[in-house]
Image (cartoon, helix red, strand yellow):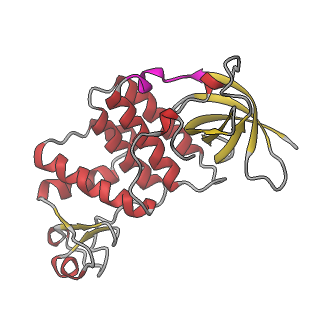
Amino acid sequence: MPLVKTAAIVLHSRKWGDADRIVTCYTLRLGKLRGVARGARRLKSRLGGMIEPFTLCQLDLFEKRGDSLYRISQVALDEPFAKLRSDLALMTAAGRMVNVVSAVMAEGDAEPRVFEMLESGLRTLVESRDAAWTTLLFQIRLLGLTGFRPQTEQCATCGQANRAALPHFSPLAGGMVCERCASRQPFRCTALSRGSVAFLQQALHMQPALLSRLQAAGQVRAEVETVIESYVTVVAGRRLPAVDFLTGSGSA
């Protein structure tokens, strides 16, 4: 039963048995994993307050052969991000960030850049004046980093390379499609203005460090929010749940 020490960000937490919690984390060394914190719901437990969603911490984990659950033996708190649990708009935004990471990353698939992006995203969110926009940009970055970057250079179905002729977004096809291919999609595509197409192309090819400088309002923002929401739903295989895990009623 080897001991593993790793930095971790808590994605979800739920009740387990009479006094325990099952915690889903994204860790620096092991990627996404689930662990059990024995006695975490007891009043005198030191673990309870350290395994809240969004918390950045250091974990001591024991892995038992044949068991998919790690045992969380110790937790050292690095950053609680308490503000993200005390404001509804921030809670919703942070919940979206951790839900997207949880949906697109498989258990045991360690990707340090995803860990660093999530930590940076949560820190940025604390100071953000527009939580929804910060979260949208985070999702665009994550899609690009994890191999799900939407196709914007050519039709995602037929390969037509004329950007001016790609006025629709198909989440099922994985990007922009031409008029003819849009009419053949089994589900309705989203028609985009030229401004929205230009924004997506710029956002998906911009250096991550510069992405926060992008701004959009009105029709462009509404259209971009719609296509990213629909595409994330397809990538995740389901519509992501509402932020209901803070009470312990959500699934891990």
Residue 83, compared with residue 223, is above or below; it is above
Please report the residue visible at 71 percent of the width from the left and 39 percent of the height from the top. Answer: 36
Q: Quadrant of the N terminus?
A: top right
Question: Looking at the picture, how far across and down is residue 212, in whole percent?
Answer: 31, 37
Residue 110 shown left or right of residue 117 in the figure: right
Please report the residue visible at 46 percent of the width from the left and 46 percent of the height from the top. Answer: 99
Magenta range:
78-86
Residue 242, compared with residue 176, is above or below; it is above
Answer with the quarter of the image where residue 180 lies. bottom left
* Residue lying farthest to the top in this orientation: 44
* Residue lying farthest to the front in this orientation: 18
* Residue lying farthest to the right in this orientation: 1
Question: Looking at the picture, how far across and down is residue 213, in whole percent?
Answer: 27, 36
Q: Is residue 67 magenta?
A: no
Q: Is residue 79 magenta?
A: yes
Answer with the quarter of the image where residue 191 lies. bottom left
Answer with the quarter of the image where residue 89 lies. top left
Question: Looking at the picture, how far across and down is residue 27, in whole percent?
Answer: 63, 41
Question: Looking at the picture, how far across and down is residue 201, in whole percent?
Answer: 26, 56
Please report the residue visible at 68 percent of the width from the left and 46 percent of the height from the top. Answer: 30
Please report the residue visible at 43 percent of the width from the left and 35 percent of the height from the top. Answer: 121
For the residue pair 250 and 151, the one nearer the viewer reads as 250
Residue 5, compared with residue 151, is above or below; it is above
For the residue pair 133 and 158, the one nearer the viewer reads as 133
